[in-house]
Amino acid sequence: MPRQDNDLATEAEVAIHVADIAATPVAASQHHSLKHSLLGPSLTKSGQDGVDQKKVSEIIYNASKGSKYFNNEEHKDKNLTVKINRILAKKRELQRIEAQGGLKQEKKKADDCIAELEYGRDLSQTIVHVDCDAFYAAVEELDRPELKEVPFAVGVGVLTTCNYMARKFGCRSGMAGFVADKLCPELIHIPLNFGKYTAKAKEVRAVLEQYDPRFESASIDEAYLNITKYCQDHNMEPEDVVEQMRAEVHAEAKITISGGIAANAKLAKICSNKNKPNGQYRIPSDRASVLAFMRHLPTRKVNGIGRVFERELDAIGIKTCGDIYEQRHYLNKLFGEKAFQFLMSVHLGLGRTNVSPVEEHERKSVGTESTFHDIDSSDELRQKLRWTAEELEKDLKRTEFKGRTLVLKIKLHTYEVLSRQVQPPKAVYTADDLFHYALPMLHKEMKDRPGMKLRLMGLRCTHLVSMKKGEVDFFGRGRQLQDRGESYSSKMDVDEEGWQKWPPDEEFEDAARQERQEEMEELERLSQQQQSDPRGPSREDQLPSSPSTQKPKYDPDGAPSDYRRYGNGFAWRSILEEEAAARAVAEEAKAVLEQWNCPICHSPQTADERKFNEHIDLCLSRETIREIVTKGDEGDSRVPEGSTAKRKRGQGAVDRGAVRKKAFFA
Ligand code: TTP
Ligand code: MG
């Protein structure tokens, strides 16, 4: 008798089976996968089409063998291989069930999901993603044009980027400096100068603003724009608009940018990388073109599919976004509901069409984390937690939020990542409270894992409550942030406690960004150790650095490095928020300088329309009260119905309008 879906092996059964298989020795393919992982996080960076990656991986392997970086990668790769073996075993189990007639429900669920997502497909908008070419390197070339002729990289210890000439040798972002030197012995290293990059980013943004005043600055060198209106208003084709915009950026900022044009943000981002540098690409806004584009697109090209997820997908036979369909009924069981939904929308080439300034996006969480040398002493771990709580308090105060949920994240020395969360009885933001509620979680982990050694600790507040003025209700309670309901599904997706879930896309994009960020920081830390190794100093130590350049601050004991702030635009949002706050202060200062005289009391007032009107209202009501009191003194102070004073009050409202008008036209 064929097996029905409800005959599916229980999770526990599968888990036991899987555990047996996972316990088998690490596969022979490990060596191969390690070489692949040594290629680093930026393997898909543009400018490397003609590069022999096999040769590059051999050079990296030999250059780094025995180094801390190598051991690090080997360790991570071993853990991932075990995880992948577990996934493969689970897939085999699912295939067995399918062969017996099971998994019909899973297939139906996937098909229903596809139908629902298809129904919501929006092809009406023209979204553009622009990204500066070799950004930090391009800015450096402006000051030192001679660099255009040589391969060079920007970054100390780790390359944040390199010019396209250096990319031909296999050098790229997120690569240890000493490895890059082996690939390209002539490589010149330039120290970072973040001030210059943020100033240049501002110049680029000034041009983008002309095309979409509500463009979204996604990182230091990239942005999303919705040019639908611009195209209509100027009766122009999207390609021509983007050509013009790129030319204008070049004329104003003297650097080149590349652009992607499509019906949604996810596709546009993939497109901007297609004809880099100094190029553009468009996917026509019809369903057939979108599906055809996705069919052969390697999964890694999608924002949200990082190194680890790419390997997991590859292991089960998903190399391109087109391959997702065939495996659709396994995905939920193998990777969970969120990943299933995310992959379904990736397969269909769907994405968000809403574009808006990042600093206006509602925050879903505020958190901080840091990597450090392994810590195992319980005292030190507690101190680290206290320090993390203090850092988080600073961020929460700056952003004016409290959190209803507090999440502790730790990474063991084995690279296993764990997180626990707690809902304190009140929303929290002070370091004392954060520490107080996080400590039992840490203690629990210490108890469960005697001798626990950590290499990363983080605290994060979610389910935020705003403490901004105007967002506190009548009882002084902060407003609970809501999602703006701009996810794909028309139905609101809520978790078991009724909190709205984040759109899976954002979560995956955040996770991939974080994966990259952690790698960057880890690499930076390891490369600093490398520099003090007997293997010799790295070349940038031998280069003169100009006094204006600044080395990225990295505190191995946990202070967030500048890589967190500037690397890959990770804390870009905070930078924009700080800029917006500075603008607000400047505007306020300007308003204080300029003053308007009140037509009633004649005293000078801040030149702010709203405040000025409020002041006039106050003055007028004072006048009215004075009149009432005067009249009352003359006659009946209780002001009966229909009395002159009552009528006067009504009249006052009319007069008020007249006075205001006069004030403004005067
Ligand atoms: P990217 O746009 O990813 O890279 P890029 O502009 O240098 O090159 P491309 O032509 O491929 O777009 O990143 C923008 C800048 O952010 C980059 O110049 C340096 C910095 N960065 C980091 O600090 N760390 C990183 O891992 C990456 C990828 C970039
Ligand atoms: Mg770029």
Image: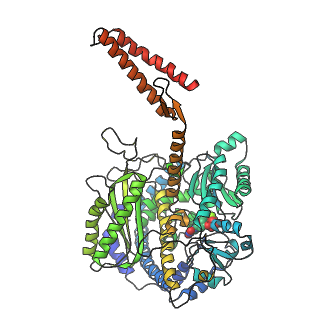
Q: Is residue 143 left or right of residue 327?
A: right
Picture residue at 35% right of the left edge, 19% below the top = 625
- Name of the residue lying farthest toward the bottom: 534
Compared with 101, 485 (above or below) is above
Image coords of residue 152 (percent x, y): 67, 76
Locate residue 269: give its quadrant.
Answer: bottom right
Give the quadrant of the C terminus: top right
Image coords of residue 278 (percent x, y): 71, 62
Compared with 666, 575 (above or below) is below
Near-viewer residue (30 or 610) = 610
Res. 79 in view: yes
Picture residue at 25% right of the left edge, 53% below the top = 425
Q: Is residue 183 left or right of residue 578?
A: right
Near-viewer residue (17 or 445) = 445
Ligand 1 quadrant assignment: bottom right
Near-viewer residue (547 or 557) = 547
Res. 298 in view: no
Q: Is residue 283 left or right of residue 593?
A: right
Label tally: 0
Compared with 408, 67 (above or below) is below
Give the quadrant of the N terminus: bottom left
Image coords of residue 45 (percent x, y): 62, 70
Picture residue at 55% right of the left edge, 37% below the top = 594
**Colour mode?**
rainbow
Compared with 26, 132 (above or below) is above
Near-viewer residue (271 or 23) = 271
Image coords of residue 115 (percent x, y): 51, 51
Locate residue 229: give its quadrant.
Answer: top right
